[in-house]
Every structure is written in structure tokens, then in C-alpha cells.
């Protein structure tokens, strides 16, 4: 690695260390106070200005002062944070993960949440400061009646027509932040979760490629769906679903690494808030590949620092952001390195390498999942954290989800579960994919190997048909 790139890595690591020192010294409390004060002012003004549209025309001078102050508040928040994320969750309002506080008699939180929710919108990301005229246009647009169909898309289009492409609307959020307590879980079909997750990952990569500051909030909502999935095998089902080759490879890889990381985190007993942070960090781990170096993505040896530089566009240092930065820099660092990687980095290293080895291409996976596990297990204690690797193996089993197996009657099945019980380590739930003789099954047929069927061999990419 060149001296220049070593300097970049050292600089990024020094910035993280400085942020950690500031957090320990309590300096971020001052930042949080400033963000909260500006955010509360912005919320009050926006709610009040929306109410005023029912009394005055927007050209009335009564709007000049509040719109000017709102524009100033957003400019100051941008100066503090680098990107402003206003999120409304269940009558609570956050600015970049910092919860705003209102008098118990105040209706601002409820009014503002309901105002935006009419447009099927739960959050607003402002990528660049906006001026007073644009602020007026925003007030008019959000106070207007919502479109009867696709209201959020209609509102987004209205903002773009008046030159506000820097304002990005987000869907209604449902996620948990640490310390905010448990909320009711919503059970959703695995395919539905995967389809939505693929869209979120696509939007994330497109946004990063455009040079925008990273926005973790939609990603966190997506990861929370993974964490919330009930049943021992739901995450394994999601792992199997990410083998869908119709979505772009980088989307599939990021989503698969996030799914596998959450699976490992659950196996070692991480709390739900930490699982959500872990999954988000996994989604961003390869973000450096969206950057541009003379018209091309950076090479492997520089994508980690490129990803860290992207994340450093966000000012302020929440603990979750520091973890994401460390993951970007460390997720390829080996376990026996003198500077042992962080826990999240060690988990994501396992998930990342496993997916790279088994990633599906037009000709099939590079390595069959059982062989990938065996190869990685041999590197436990040197390349990988042996405890985390053992936890991964314990959850995936002898025939991990995605393994293609030939049974004793000549039929082929696809493993769709991990280990359901220690006694079933080599007996996953499978789905029939080829009948004896080579014909395709007409119906979906699941076969439980615990009921006595025997595996004759693993179908490997190089195996003859």
C-alpha cells in the first residue's frame, strides 16, 4: 500500500479515536444540546407555519420571519451534522437519532407527525441547506391536501419541481431505538421482507453513488424487520431468499452479509439494539465501492478507507456511527492481527467471507456452502474469531441454507433451514428442486431430513448434472 493510502487510513483512524475521546469526555453532550434546541425550534416553526396556511396566503409577510428562521435552523444543523434527518416515529420526533423533547401540554409532536403522515411520509432528509423561498414552498406542499394515490411520490415530485432535489422524503418508520422500550412486533412474510429490503439496499447504493451523505434510517428500519422476525428459522429463510439473482450483485451481497451478521449476533446473544446497529453496519461495510477513482470503483485494497471517508461526511459521532466506521476499516482484518478488530468487524468478517465464497453467479456458487464452512473453520483462530466462527457453524449446520443435496432416491433438494436443534445438526428442512430423473417438481414440496431421508452427496458447482 502506498504512503498516501497509509496516511489516509491513519487519518481516518485518528478521527475515530478523537471522536471516542470526545464521547468519553462528555463533549458530545454539548453537540446533542445544540441539535436538540435547533430541532425543537424547527419543529415548532414548521408546525405553526403549516397551521398559518389555513389563515393567510403564503405571500403574506407573516410567513417571512418563521421561514427565515427555519432556513437558518436547517443551515445551523447542517453545519453541526453535515446532513439533517427529521424522523417522526409514533408521535416522537428525532433529529439525527437525537430525540426532541416537548412540553407535555404541547401538541407539536402529534401535529407534525400527522401532518407528514397524511402524505405517507415518516421522515425528511435534507442533503443541503435550503433558502427562505424554498422553505415557503416546503410549507405549502406539506400543508396541502395529499394526493389520492402515491401521496409521498406526489409530494416528492412537487418538491423537485420547485428545485428542492436535496430534500428526500422517507416512508413511515417503525423501528426501535435503544432505551425507547419495546413496541409491538409486526409479522411479515419472509419474501415480503426480502423484497422491501432489496429496494432499500438499491436506494442506499444509488444514494451513495450520487455522493450523498449516508442515510442509515431506512436501513435501520429494514434491519429491525430482520431482528423482529419470529421463529428460529425466519432469518435462515431470509438468507436463502437473498440467493435471488435478479437483483444487482452488490445489493444481494450487502443484504446477505447483513442477514448473516444478524444471525451470528442472535446466536451469541446480542441485545436487539446492538443487533440493529450490527445489521446497519453490515449494510454499509462495502460502501467504499460506490466511490469514484478516475471513473472506476476503488480497488480492493482501498475500498475500506473509501468507505470510511464516505461515512465521515456525517458530522457528529453517535456510538452506532463509530461502529460503522470501525467496520469499514476493519472488516478484512484478521483475528490474529496485533490490533484486534472490534466485535462487529469480527462478526462481519465471517459473514462477508462466507457470502463471497458461496455467492451465486450465472454458473452457480463459487464454493458449495458446506465446503465454504469447512474451509473457513480451518482458519479459525488465525483469520477468524474462533468463538464467532463456531457460533456461525452451530447455527448453519452441516448443510447450510442454500446447499443443494442429492438424496438417497436420486432427487435433489435445497436446504432452507439452519440447525433447528443440536440433534438435527445434519438434518435441515429442505425443498425439492429436482425429481429423480431430472424433471422439475410442479408443486412446492418440503422435505424434512429429520424424518429419515439420507443425503447421498453434496451437489458442488463443478459436479456433473
Image (cartoon, rainbow, N blue to C red):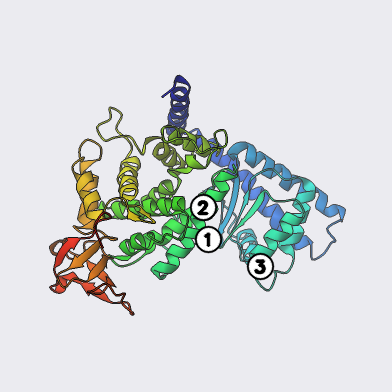
* Mark linked to residue 374: none
Cα–Cα span, label 3 and label 1: 16 Å
Q: In the image, is 142 to the left or to the right of 58?
A: left
Q: Residues within 10 Å of mark 2 (few under 14, many from 20)?
A: some
Q: Based on the displayed image, in which of its 4 quarters is residue 457 positioned?
A: bottom left
Depth check: 50 or 134 in front?
Answer: 134
Q: Say which residue label 1 marks.
A: 173
Image coordinates for residue 183, horizontal then vertical, percent: 43, 64
Circle 1/circle 2 CB separation < 8 Å: yes
Residue at image mark 3: 151
Disc number at residue 217? Answer: 2
Alpha-carbon neighbours of circle 3 within 10 Å: few (<14), some, or many (≥20)?
Answer: some
Apparent side of residue 217 relative to residue 137 in the rendered image (left or right): left
Q: Residue at x 52, y 49 (%)?
A: 205
Label 1, residues with CA under 10 Å away: few <14, some 14-19, many ≥20: some
Please say whether residue 99 is visible from this viewpoint: no
* Mark closest to the chain's N terminus, 2 or 3: 3
Sequence-first tag of 1 and 2: 1
Are circles 2 and 3 on residues that touch, CB within 8 Å? no
- Residue 387 in percent (x, y) is at 21, 44
Amino acid at each position: 500500500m502506498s504512503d498516501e493510502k497509509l496516511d489516509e487510513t491513519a487519518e481516518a483512524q485518528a478521527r475515530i479515536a478523537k471522536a471516542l475521546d470526545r464521547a468519553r469526555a462528555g463533549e458530545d453532550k454539548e453537540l446533542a444540546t445544540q441539535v436538540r434546541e435547533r430541532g425543537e425550534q424547527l419543529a415548532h416553526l414548521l408546525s405553526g407555519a403549516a397551521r398559518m396556511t389555513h389563515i393567510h396566503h403564503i405571500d403574506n409577510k407573516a410567513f417571512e420571519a418563521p421561514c427565515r428562521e427555519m432556513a437558518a435552523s436547517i443551515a445551523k444543523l447542517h453545519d453541526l451534522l453535515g446532513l439533517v434527518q427529521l424522523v417522526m416515529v409514533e408521535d416522537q420526533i428525532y433529529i439525527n437519532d437525537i430525540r426532541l423533547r416537548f412540553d407535555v401540554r404541547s401538541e407539536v409532536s402529534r401535529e407534525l407527525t400527522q401532518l407528514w403522515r397524511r402524505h405517507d411520509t415518516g421522515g425528511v432528509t435534507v442533503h443541503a441547506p435550503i433558502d427562505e423561498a424554498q422553505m415557503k414552498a416546503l410549507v405549502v406542499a406539506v400543508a396541502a391536501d395529499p394526493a389520492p394515490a402515491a401521496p409521498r411520490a406526489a409530494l416528492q415530485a412537487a418538491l423537485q419541481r420547485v428545485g428542492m432535489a436535496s430534500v428526500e422524503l422517507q416512508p413511515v418508520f417503525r423501528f426501535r431505538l435503544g432505551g425507547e422500550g419495546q413496541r409491538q412486533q409486526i409479522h411479515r412474510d419472509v419474501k415480503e421482507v426480502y423484497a422491501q429490503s432489496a429496494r432499500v439496499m438499491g436506494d442506499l447504493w444509488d444514494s451513495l453513488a450520487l455522493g450523498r451523505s449516508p442515510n442509515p434510517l431506512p436501513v435501520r428500519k429494514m434491519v429491525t424487520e430482520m431482528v423482529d422476525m419470529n421463529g428460529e428459522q425466519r432469518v435462515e429463510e431470509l438468507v436463502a431468499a437473498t440467493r435471488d439473482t435478479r437483483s444487482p450483485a452488490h445489493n444481494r451481497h450487502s443484504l446477505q452479509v447483513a442477514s448473516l451478521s444478524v444471525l451470528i449476533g442472535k446466536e451469541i446473544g446480542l441485545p436487539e439494539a446492538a443487533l440493529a446497529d450490527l445489521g446497519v453496519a453490515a449494510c454499509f461495510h462495502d460502501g467504499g465501492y460506490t466511490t469514484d477513482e478516475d471513473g472506476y470503483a476503488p480497488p480492493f485494497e482501498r475500498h475500506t478507507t473509501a468507505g470510511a471517508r464516505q461515512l465521515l461526511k456525517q458530522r457528529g459521532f453517535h456510538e452506532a456511527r463509530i461502529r460503522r466506521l470501525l467496520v469499514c476499516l476493519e472488516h478484512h482484518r484478521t483475528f490474529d492481527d496485533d490490533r484486534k478488530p472490534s466485535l462487529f468487524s469480527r462478526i462481519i468478517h465471517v459473514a462477508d467471507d462466507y457470502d463471497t465464497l458461496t455467492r451465486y453467479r450465472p454458473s452457480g456458487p463459487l464454493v458449495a456452502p458446506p465446503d465454504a464452512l469447512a474451509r473457513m473453520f480451518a482458519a479459525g483462530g488465525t483469520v477468524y474469531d474462533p468463538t464467532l466462527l463456531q457460533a456461525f457453524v452451530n447455527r448453519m449446520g452441516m448443510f447450510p441454507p442454500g446447499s443443494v443435496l442429492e438424496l438417497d432416491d436420486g432427487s435433489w433438494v435445497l436446504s432452507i433451514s439452519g440447525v433447528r436443534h443440536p440433534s438435527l445438526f445434519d438434518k435441515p428442512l429442505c425443498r425439492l428442486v429436482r425429481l429423480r430423473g431430472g424433471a422439475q417438481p410442479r408443486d412446492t414440496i418440503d422435505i424434512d431430513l429429520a424424518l429419515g431421508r439420507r443425503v447421498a452427496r453434496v451437489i458442488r458447482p463443478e459436479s456433473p448434472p
